[in-house]
Amino acid sequence: MRTPFTPHRPLLRFFRGFGAPYRRLFALGVGMRLCETAADLVTPWPVAAVIDHVLGPGASRGSPLGPLLGVLGTGRTAMLTAAAALVVLVALVSAAFDYAGDRLMNGAGERMSAAIRRETFAHLQRLPLSYHDRQTVGGSASRVITDCGAVKDALVAFCSVLFPGVLSATGYAAALLVLDWRFGLIGVAAVPAVLFLGVRNRRRGHRAARRRREAEGELTALVTEALQGIRTVHAFGGHGVHDRDFAAGSRGVLSAGLEAVDVQARRVPLLESVTAAATAALLWTGGVGVLRGWWSTGHLVVALGYLTGMVAPLRALSKLSGTFAQGQASAERVAAVLAEPCPLRAPVRAGARGLPHRARGRVDFAGVSMDYGDRRALHRLDLKIAPGERIALTGPNGAGKSTALALVAGLYRPTRGTVRIDGTATADLPEEWLRRQVTAVLQETFLFAGTIADNIRYARPDASPRQVRAAAEAALVTAFTDGFPDGLGTRLGDCGGGLSGGQRQRVGIARALLADAPIVLLDEPTSGLDAEAERLVVAALGRLVAHRTVVMVTHRPALLETATGTVALAPAGPGPATGRPAGR
């Protein structure tokens, strides 16, 4: 079980579970990086050997690779050739280990980030509707796509730059100390200065990155909302309103982005200054040592190479501060989603033992109240619906009719009271079982991009083409799809683009028929349809509601005629709302 996230708990501890499956890959990658570092430490020695043994006097205190230069002969040209071959060989070995390390460690980072993205999306889908009621679609999409992308960039940067850079800098610093303690002290003294600059700027960078991610999330939500309502934008000519809102949001993103740019721009010159000071100190110390005979010129060249090698990854790390700050800000937003409690339904509870494959269809409301924040939508509803009854809920807007349907479907849990199906509270029923017992046709059927058959099969992904065809015929969908070149295989645009309102409703009814649930919820399924479309939809609904328990919300006479009883709900108030079906 993942440790709960709080602002004071390290993010690495929260996300560490995602990296557990890839420990072997990471360990192997570490081994490759160690080998690469060892090869890099050898790189300057062929040059030192040339300086000491070919161009210099050939002092015995020269390069330890000096004896290798004589492999091809003792002439100067032969020794130069051997040194050049060594340079190429060491570079190839280093490149091979670099490639293997990158593949292993970056692969681990990519797999880990993909796991984070998958779990974030899966968890987001399963959060209760009360959570989604408080969020915008664009904001939630931004968490899955943009924020998880920033987390991925940070993870890959950690695997490909940060960890290898720290390993390399540590190796070079240790090599400087082994070469000569004075060289080592100069190199090690540069590290605290670099770290101080990094810590000092990281805080500013993190604040700027957090501001930027929040502003980008709001901007994404604004764009998503405008595009979802593009027909309304065109109908009312509201382009200017959205242009102004977008410009205001863009200014917020720009302001945070400029602050991040300022932090990044200051870091490089400061680091260059520290590097220059360390190089000057080492050059002066090394030069004095060469003049006094403490070490050879080749040793000074190696020391300068090691110092450059040590500072180079530190410079690269400093440029990553923006990536890590952005990644941390995004990781906090992702962690906040994953930390949202997701109500789990136990597979079997005491009151849910011995569940049949198919419910009888009895629905009971016992003192049910439902609040949305400070607003009460339903107050003390008592209602008993026998199997096979078709009850119509009527009443003014705000009386809680749609809320009652949502409670039967288990989309919300009542604030007070209990909703039972066949005597068991919906909160105690396994979610998978409950979804098989209750289906719904809403005021506007949502269709996904894909074929008409795919949208019908959404209720039962394992349904055969023959079963999909039968449901489509029963819902009168084939009455219009048979005129399409591709029939039920006709592809739809977003939200069912290409179909009329009545046609979309019939597809929704076919979907509900294929689900074959014993309890059917109808929420104004014929609202907004013309007379002919309503006639066809009611005819299709007649087949759906046969021999099933039906709870419907409607004011249309054509649909009310199919009800066996009605219950009038009043707006939520201090008194009880008691439902007693009135027979027709």
Image: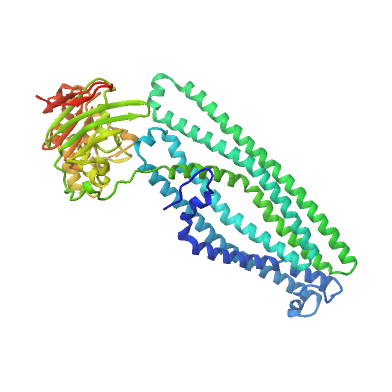
x 58%, y 56%: residue: 160
Q: Is residue 444 visible?
A: yes
Q: How many marks?
A: 0
Judge left or right: residue 302 versus residue 387: right
Residue 86, percent from left and from top: 70, 71
Judge left or right: residue 507 versus residue 270: left
Q: Quadrant of residue 359?
A: top left
Q: Residue furthest left?
A: 584
Residue 446, percent from left and from top: 30, 35
Q: Vertical placement of 225 versus 83: above or below? A: above
Q: Nearer the viewer, residue 107 or 570?
A: 570
Quadrant location of the C terminus in the rendered image: top left
Judge left or right: residue 511 versus residue 11: left
Residue 32, percent from left and from top: 58, 66
Q: Quadrant of residue 91?
A: bottom right
Q: Vertical placement of 464 versus 59: above or below? A: above
Residue 271, percent from left and from top: 73, 48
Judge left or right: residue 469 versus residue 151: left
Q: Vertical placement of 195 versus 93: above or below? A: above
Q: Nearer the viewer, residue 113 or 124?
A: 124
Q: Residue furthest right?
A: 292
Q: Is residue 507 visible?
A: no
